[in-house]
Image (cartoon, coloured by chain):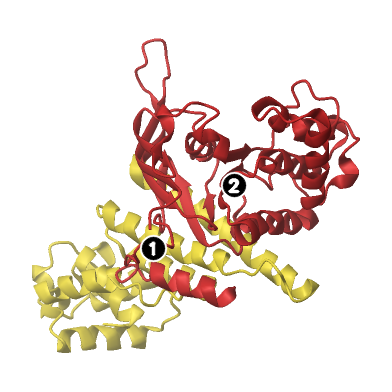
Chain colours: A yellow, B red
Amino acid sequence: MKSNVSGAVLSLVIERPSVGASVCRRFEARYGGLLGSGRQHIYDALSRLVRDGMLVRVPRELLAELDEEDARGAITDGYRATAEGARAYQRWLADVSLLRPDSLIGSRQETLIRLVSTQPQDRAGALRLLDRYEQVILRLIQSTPLEARNLMDELLADELTDLAQAELRWIARTRDKLSAA
Amino acid sequence: MRGLLQLDGVTHRYPRGSRGRHDRIALRDVSLTIGAGELVGVWGPRNSGRSTLALVAVGITLPGEGVVRFDGADLVRQPMLGVRGGIGYCDRDFDPVMAQTVLEHVAAPLLSSTGTTNSSAEQAAYDQLERVGGAELSGLEPDELDPAETMRVAIARATITRPRLLVVDEPTTGVRASQERPLLRLLHSFARDEGMAVLMTADDAAALAGVDRALSLNDGTLRGPTDALDEEPRAVGDDDGVGRVVELRRARRADA
């Protein structure tokens, strides 16, 4: 499973078996700034995950927790994850091949998507994710040449390292909070 | 090939409170190997253990647990002017002790450790100040130096005895942005041109630009490729997406 939308949808259903409308609402609330995806994409992802055996449809009456909005209006069946879905979710979380070693911005986005997709009780998983992201950042800084070809190159390199510095500090703070929680 | 500097399982605590309960742990099971000619940068935020790591690496602070080896010998057991004579250390705190001028300050290690005459020590100090681009500072007094000049002088003093290992704690802290890179190029040159093993700590990530290995230190825990590049290559990245030590080594050779 390479699609971040599918991974995010799977994460939401694992967190709480839900009807489609609830998945869409929670997706927008959690991933709004990270994954731009319309409702059609989310329903497409739900269908794909069912087709691939990672989710199954369940009657809404069997969903243990329906939020008020779902309970009022939902008439369709809900979704819950299968064991294969849970395994695929873990593989997706651990797949850092998309953390591009040459792109701080891209790696940051991939990390944040996975971090907010990590179940709150999985602190060890979140810490591993931070460790990997930190290594990407350090490699990026390390690969910055000390001898810039010209002043503009040097200014751009400064901008990259300032961004990287901010991310390193964020990682340190987040790691501290996760360890203390 | 073994590293020139080896830290193995080093843990160090600072006691807190009269009964020593609630010790603050500055280093947690830190292992690190640095080979000759290698420049290793360690980034860490405030109170991460950076300065303790630097002091332990040169044998000024003795760790509570673990081993520190320099060229295979246990650093803790060596006499101060024996093995440790091969190690240079400097930080941003300029403590000239009895020296009146920069020249006297730089020459001091030769006079105190090798019995060199005053005139030859002064000549060597001039040479070393020229090496670090600070010859014009020789007649100044310490309080006349700006932070970058202070660090250049400190590096000159730390390297005048031609150490094989140079440990520099926070070289760019307080230094103006335009002066950072020349200072870093100077440190790189000691590794590249003179084959020194250089360990540099920094709270400014920009200081890690171009280093052979970049590591992080958080709450006393060291993360990153901790083995020397000349060690037998060991995979560190198949499962973490950051590549292999061997790739670092190849990249470095390609750069050279």
Residue A73 drawn above or below residue B176: below
Helix, strand, or loop for circle 1? helix
Residue A172 drawn above or below residue B53: below
Query: Image quarter for residue B226?
Result: bottom left
Q: Position of residue A113 (x, y in %)?
A: 39, 69
Q: Nearer the viewer, residue B255 or B148?
A: B255
Q: Nearer the viewer, residue A36 or B140?
A: B140
**Residue A82 makes an appearance in the image:** no
Query: Image quarter for residue A144?
Result: bottom right
Helix, strand, or loop for circle 2? loop
Chain designation of label 2:
B
Chain designation of label 1:
A
Q: Residue at x 68, y 56 (%)?
A: B184
Residue B203 drawn above or below residue B96: below
Q: Nearer the viewer, residue B166 or B120?
A: B120
Residue B123 drawn above or below residue B34: above
**Amino acid under label 1?**
Arg
Q: Which residue is mark 1?
A: A132
Q: Bin the neighbour count of mark 1 within 10 Å (Cα to Cα): few under 14, some 14-19, many 20 and up.
A: many
Query: Image quarter for residue A66?
Result: bottom left
**Residue B187 - label:** none
Q: Are marks 2 and 1 on the same chain?
A: no
B229 left or right of B146?
left
For the C terminus of chain A, give its image quadrant: top left
Q: Bin the neighbour count of mark 2 within 10 Å (Cα to Cα): few under 14, some 14-19, many 20 and up.
A: many
Q: Position of residue A180 (x, y in %)?
A: 35, 40
For the N terminus of chain A, give its image quadrant: bottom left
**Residue A112 makes an appearance in the image:** yes
Q: Residue at x 53, y 39 (%)?
A: B54
**Amino acid under label 2?**
Asp
Q: Which residue is mark 2?
A: B203
Q: CA distance from mark 2 to mark 1?
A: 20 Å
